[in-house]
Image (spheres, coloured by chain):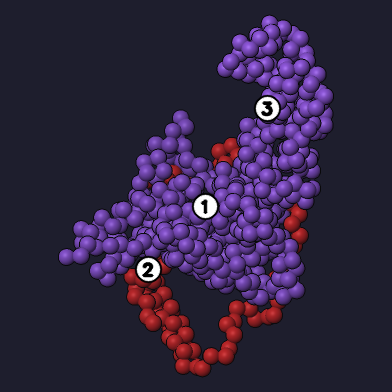
């Protein structure tokens, strides 16, 4: 599998990255090298191998369903410069 | 040339808010009615250095909801980050079990066009977090021309179950029955209250059409339906639209369309994201659910509403339509069963609950928990009517008196001047003697043989019935008057 420079550029835009020509060429090379490596895995017989997601056999820690209010939501609100009353403000977003 | 026929192929995605006090991954309250942005914290706002921690109760609610949909519970499930940029999502990704869900492979039964039961397969149910809510308005409050949107993150991180069906739905009617039955089952399981008016259930429908000439139209995702009626209308509209395009030989474009409830149409919609980038959520190790845990959850599952309704029909001989009404609400069904347990005839009790109890609840906007006649008291009233001690009409008067005055059966009967067992024998004769004494001219006319058509006798019978407040048997009154007149 290979990605074209258009596809890589579009992924970059999704990640809010603007790449110049040299950076784009570098990113295409880097991603395609990585995809080549994944292709090599396909040569292995992995029929009986469990899909891998975590290096360690950790248990997902669970917590009780207890409400503990965060004491300073105002501080979170003021992390943003765009606040109106108790709302965060963003540019207009409307389905036409 | 044979006429072309079209078969709709529909899959439904449902989001249901699961019942919990705190959010999915943090301890903020799930109260979305609170003042904007008061139930937020660094975890649900995705601030650096925070770690999500999964809510034990939500996992259990997910298992219960899955069991309600006849799903199997997977021993291992996993959370992913679904990345996209949108202001309702402060982290830039939604944490969702999309690829390795906690429950899979269930079904919900509905009736097809011929009235036969068919199974709509449920592909899976997975847990995920909800996003914040956006409010749009211009400075003067109008939507048109608004240049700012306002974001409230109170809902962000509240727990959802996403339920994805297989494309087994063939009509708008089947879609509505599917979501209604599913909702009822989830409420019974206790996983969610699924209050529609509070936006606790949202639907998307994937609609495509298969033509008898072998053509398949592309799939269209229809969004923004938040009531059963909207779901039904949106699917009906989309079926008509796609059929028309295919009849004209045009392509149905694969796209997302937005349902506009006011205009009754779907229109092409801007999509939130081009790519949905998934990675394993590195902060949440796989969730393991032991068989012992699953067994504990299974033991908590109550009898499901459709199973209960079938039992009412087969064991208690209750008409199917009445059984459906009684089982619609778990608490109403429990009330009815308590009446039966207290000795009421099941068929009679079912009619009293369906007509009188629901009427009063409706008039007073009560829930069954507010209803002030205890099941054993209603059972006693039903029994008295059943045994003929009071008439059905009197029973209804007693019922109304009890709901209005919080009284018991005996008190209501006394206050209403009703004589249990009716007015008969000596009591009836006393009433007749009084009536005759008060109407000597009528009595004279009958005795003189002038009442050839029996009109005067009927008149006296009417007076006696009135005096006894309708509590005497008409046949007995007629015979007793005749006897009294001849003496």
Confirm whether residue B272 shows in the render.
no
Q: Chain of mark 3?
A: B
The earlier-in-sequence mark between 3 and 1 is: 1
Residue on which the image places disc 3: B474
Q: Position of residue B298 (x, y in %)?
A: 71, 67
**On residue B202, which mark appears?**
1
Q: Residue furthest front?
A: B449
**Which corner quadrant of the image does residue A7 belong to?**
bottom left
Query: Which residue is more in the foreground, B444 or B38?
Result: B444
Q: Chain of mark 1?
A: B
Crowding around mark 2 (Cα neighbors within 10 Å: few <14, some 14 to 19, many 20+) is: many
Discs 3, 1: same chain = yes
**On residue A9, which mark appears?**
2
Discs 3, 2: same chain = no
Residue shown at 58% from the left, 88% from the top? A49
Specify the chain shown as purple.
B
Q: Position of residue B56 (x, y in %)?
A: 72, 63
Q: Is residue B409 left or right of residue A33?
A: right
Marks 3 and 2 sit apart, C-alpha to C-alpha, by 94 Å
Q: Is residue B453 left or right of residue B274?
A: right
Query: Which residue is more in the foreground, B220 or B403?
Result: B403
Is label 3 in contact with label 1 (beta carbons under 8 Å)? no
Q: Position of residue B391 (x, y in %)?
A: 70, 33
Residue shown at 34% from the left, 55% from the top? B239
């Amino acid at each position: 599998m290979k990605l074209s420079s258009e596809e890589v550029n579009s992924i970059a835009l999704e990640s809010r990255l603007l790449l110049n020509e040299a950076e784009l060429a570098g990113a295409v090379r880097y991603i395609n090298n990585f995809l080549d490596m994944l292709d090599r895995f396909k040569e292995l017989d992995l029929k009986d191998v469990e899909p891998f997601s975590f290096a360690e056999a950790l248990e997902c820690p669970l917590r009780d369903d207890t409400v503990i209010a965060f004491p300073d939501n105002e501080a979170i609100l003021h992390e943003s410069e765009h606040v109106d009353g108790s709302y965060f403000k963003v540019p207009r977003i409307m389905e036409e | 040339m044979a006429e072309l026929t079209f078969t709709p192929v529909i899959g439904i995605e449902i989001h249901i808010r699961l019942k919990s006090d705190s959010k999915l991954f943090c301890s903020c309250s799930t109260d979305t009615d609170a003042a904007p942005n008061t139930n937020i914290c660094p975890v649900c706002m995705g601030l650096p250095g925070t770690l999500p921690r999964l809510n034990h109760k939500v996992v259990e609610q997910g298992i219960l909801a899955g069991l309600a949909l006849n799903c199997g519970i997977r021993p291992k499930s996993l959370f992913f980050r679904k990345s996209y940029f949108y202001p309702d999502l402060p982290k830039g990704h939604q944490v969702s079990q999309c690829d390795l869900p906690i429950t899979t492979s269930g079904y919900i039964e509905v009736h097809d066009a011929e009235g036969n039961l068919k199974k709509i397969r449920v592909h899976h149910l997975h847990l995920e977090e909800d996003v914040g809510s956006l409010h749009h308005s211009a400075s003067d409050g109008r939507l048109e021309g608004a240049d700012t949107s306002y974001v409230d993150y109170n809902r962000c991180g509240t727990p959802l179950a996403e339920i994805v069906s297989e494309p087994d739905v063939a009509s708008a009617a089947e879609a509505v029955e599917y979501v209604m039955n599913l909702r009822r089952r989830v409420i019974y399981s206790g996983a969610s209250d699924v209050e529609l008016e509070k936006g606790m259930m949202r639907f998307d429908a994937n609609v495509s059409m298969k033509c008898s000439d072998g053509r398949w139209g592309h799939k269209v995702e229809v969004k923004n339906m938040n009531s059963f009626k909207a779901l039904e209308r949106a699917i009906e509209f989309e079926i008509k639209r796609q059929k028309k395009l295919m009849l004209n030989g045009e392509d149905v474009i694969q796209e997302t369309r937005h349902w506009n409830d006011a205009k009754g149409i779907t229109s092409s919609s801007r999509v939130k994201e081009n790519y949905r980038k998934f990675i394993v959520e590195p902060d949440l190790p796989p969730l393991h659910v032991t068989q012992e845990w699953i067994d504990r959850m299974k033991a908590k599952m109550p009898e499901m509403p459709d199973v209960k309704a079938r039992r009412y029909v087969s064991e208690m001989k209750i008409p199917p339509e009445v059984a459906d009404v009684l089982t619609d609400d778990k608490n109403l069904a429990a009330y009815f069963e308590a009446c039966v347990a207290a000795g009421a005839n099941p068929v009679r009790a079912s009619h009293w609950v369906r007509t009188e109890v629901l009427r009063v609840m409706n008039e007073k906007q009560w829930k069954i928990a507010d209803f002030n006649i205890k099941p054993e008291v209603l059972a006693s009233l039903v029994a008295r009517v059943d045994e003929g001690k009071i008439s059905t009409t009197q029973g209804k008067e007693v019922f109304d008196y009890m709901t209005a005055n919080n009284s018991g059966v005996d008190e209501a009967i006394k206050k209403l001047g009703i004589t249990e067992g009716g007015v008969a024998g000596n009591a009836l004769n006393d009433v007749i003697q009084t009536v005759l004494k008060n109407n000597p001219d009528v009595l004279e006319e009958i005795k003189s043989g002038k009442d050839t058509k029996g009109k005067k006798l009927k008149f006296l019978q009417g007076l006696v019935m009135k005096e006894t407040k309708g509590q005497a048997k008409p046949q007995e009154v007629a015979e007793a008057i005749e006897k009294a007149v001849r003496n």
